Image (cartoon, coloured by chain):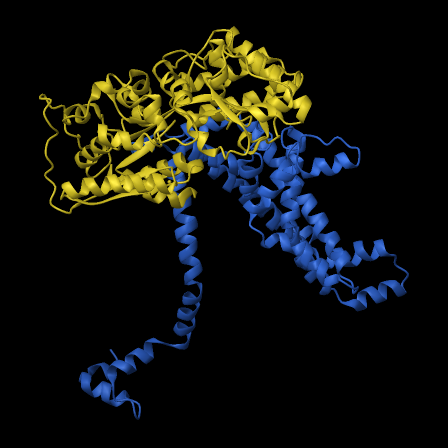
Amino acid sequence: MNTAKKLAGAAALATAAIVALAGCSASPAAPAPTTAAPNSVALRMTVWTSNEAQLALFASIADSYKATHPEIKSITFESLPFADYNTTLTTQIAGGNAPDLAWMGDLSKDLIASDALLPLTPVLKDTKGWGYDDLLPSATAEFSRDGQLYAYPFSNSPYALYVNKDLLAAAGQSLPAEGLTWDQVSTIGAAVNVATGKAGFVIRDFDFSAWNTLATVWTGWGASAWNADGTKCTFDDDKMVGAFTFLHDAVYKHSAMPGPGTKADFFAGDSAFTVAQVSRASLLTGSFGYDVVPLPAGPAGTYSVIGQAGMGVLRTSAHPQEAGSFLAYLTGPENSAKLSQFFPSARKSLLSGEKLAANNTKLTAEQLQSVVVDQIPGAVTLPNHTSPAEIAQKGKTALDAMWKPDADVEKVLGSVCSAISPLLAK
Amino acid sequence: MTAGSTLPREAVTTASRAPGDKDPVRRRARRFWTMRRRDAAAGYLFIAPQVIGVVLFVLVPVGLAIVYSLNKWNIFTGRLSFVGGANYAALAADPQLPSVLGATAVFSLGVVVLNIALGLGLAVMLNRRFHGVTFFRTLFFSPVVISVVAWTLVWGFLLQDNGGINAVLAQLGIHGPNWLQEGPTAMGAVIVTQVIRSVGVNMVLFLSALQGVPSELYEAARIDGAGSRTIFTRITLPLISPTLLLTSIITIVGALQAFAQIAVLTEGGPALSTTVLVYYVFQQAFTFNNIGYGSTLALMLLTFVMLLTVLQWQLRRKWVFYEH
């Protein structure tokens, strides 16, 4: 292990690179008290936000924790650029400089499968008043294995459809009172494109590269990237063919969706619709009239998709017990309420339109109720699997053939399965 | 045994002491630091920074890359498992590698041919005295000092389907292609942006070489009735051939190391059309966390670069003028 660590530290040069938590306490009283000497524990958590208000909130929570825990010398929140977050975090881990706690998105499966995270269920359940049963099962599933939670889902932001009402009005279009479908979105988007020259609908962050975001569409056809246990590719089934035929037609037949290589930013007024997480509402500047509605229904009916972020404790931490205790404090009922102004909570008690609206200046209580509160309980997450980056790249390489006017949708989707199946089987 | 060695020690040192040098330690030190040793020490001191740099940043990493290439490394747990030649066997079984090597060959060849041809052409044109020559020299060299990422980002915007280049073409009644989304045009775009950014270095080297060609040779050739083409092929090219060798080595090595422009402009796509070997190494090692296989690919790249350089060096006798 030591040799490996030394080699790991030197790896950065080459190409650019167990302590149990509290144990499964039999009694659900309180986590075992720390034995650390006063002022001897320095904790570091890697995060991908650089938002000053969010970092200030984290710092204030850390300060109040420190005030009651003399063993804590410092708690640092290390802000890493989002685009390179996974690479930077893995490089830190490989270099023997892993943080004590870390935010994680699609890296969570690899971390959990590698046993690199400490199970949080014992410490959270043993923390008095934490309220483990308050967590929504749909929110914890992504970060759980064998009944243990390995990362706390602190951010659960549903995807919703943003609407530029000014562009729709300019094209003489309007949304149906209820029951909006993808076909209607495509029809209205095409009409807006003809009338104004602006784009119809855009799947934000997809950019003809990040295909996992298309789960916000294909779930409406009842499709999924792979089966429930992640062992079999289902890209080539009829439902997925239907979803991609819709998207392909939207680009090349109806001009309802801009093709690859064309930038259209909804929040700059470039498109009639976009699918984005509710948390992106902060990008609305008020320069045009807008609405935010749940995702349109597909042939399989209505559905919800959420994007999640978790925070966990790394096994390599020099202070796993103290890191776990701090995480329990940070995510307890009181602090979760504070965090929910930025990150939709996984706690049922905090999910109501009124409560969310108290800290949201962009969306009304009714909007938040319909696009957040009503969506999270039944939501599915974006596809995630071990080796996420390799699956994403191999899938993208195969899917590139889709974005041509004469693409054979079925054949391309079959090639996606050929490309990613060996990785799913690992 | 010499006679001197039988004398008492103090007698020897006293007898051999030079006038004014009464300190035996200093005298012994002076005897040790002979002229030859002083020269050698100075030489070692001069090369020490380079040697230390090469050892730390080349030899040690290459050694570690060899170690990693023989192992599978679980980056999350820090466990290294010896796999022998499995990573080398994986090279043959990798279905993406042929495409990657093909893209690397096309990119390198395109960059080398265009860069040297354009660099030489610009140098010949700017090796004259005319109004504004300094401005043009500066203009063509200036991209070299611009950050490669900033340069590539700007080109990324210009090359979008609805970007600046197609807007200009549309004004001329031409429907431009979707440059970065179609294989051949994406590779062409990456090559051209790389060449425009780096051609200034070769231009300056060629300018310097051209200005070193004695003017009497040109005068003599003209008197003998040689035309421009003959003068260029029979006098200019042979005399600047050492620079041609240097620029071709620099350009090939630079092309094989190109990373940022690929990462920023195309991310290796569409499909694998612009995934060159360096970018593939990065993906395998740092994006997919396959450190062992990434190290194996890196060693393959190192072997390519070394072989190409050795080949050029061996061939120099055939075409470099001063090596005859």
Question: Whole-percent x and y of residue A400?
Answer: 58, 23
Quarter residue A56 falls in: top left
User: Above or below — where is A120 with respect to A7?
Assistant: above
Quarter residue A109 falls in: top left
Question: Is residue A63 at least partly visible in the picture?
Answer: yes
Give the chain coloured yellow.
A
Along the line of sight, which residue is nearer the eye, B138 or B318? B138
Question: Whole-percent x and y of residue A199?
Answer: 62, 25
Give the chain coloured blue.
B
Along the line of sight, which residue is nearer the eye, A158 or A391? A158
Task: Report the quarter where the C terminus of chain B lies.
Answer: bottom right
Residue lying furthest bottom in this view? B19
Along the line of sight, which residue is nearer the eye, A237 or A56? A56
- Residue occupying the point 43% across, 42% down: A15
Question: Is residue B324 at least partly visible in the picture?
Answer: no
Along the line of sight, which residue is nearer the eye, A66 or B310? A66
Question: Whole-percent x and y of residue A263?
Answer: 59, 31
User: Above or below — where is B216 with respect to B26?
Assistant: above
User: Above or below — where is B226 with respect to A74?
Assistant: below
Q: How many marks?
A: 0
Task: Report the quarter where the N terminus of chain B lies.
Answer: bottom left
Quarter residue A422 falls in: top left
- Residue occupying the point 68% across, 23% down: A195
Question: Whole-percent x and y of residue A142?
Answer: 33, 20
- Asked if residue A176 lies left or right of residue B30, the reply is right
- Residue occupying the point 19% across, 86% down: B10
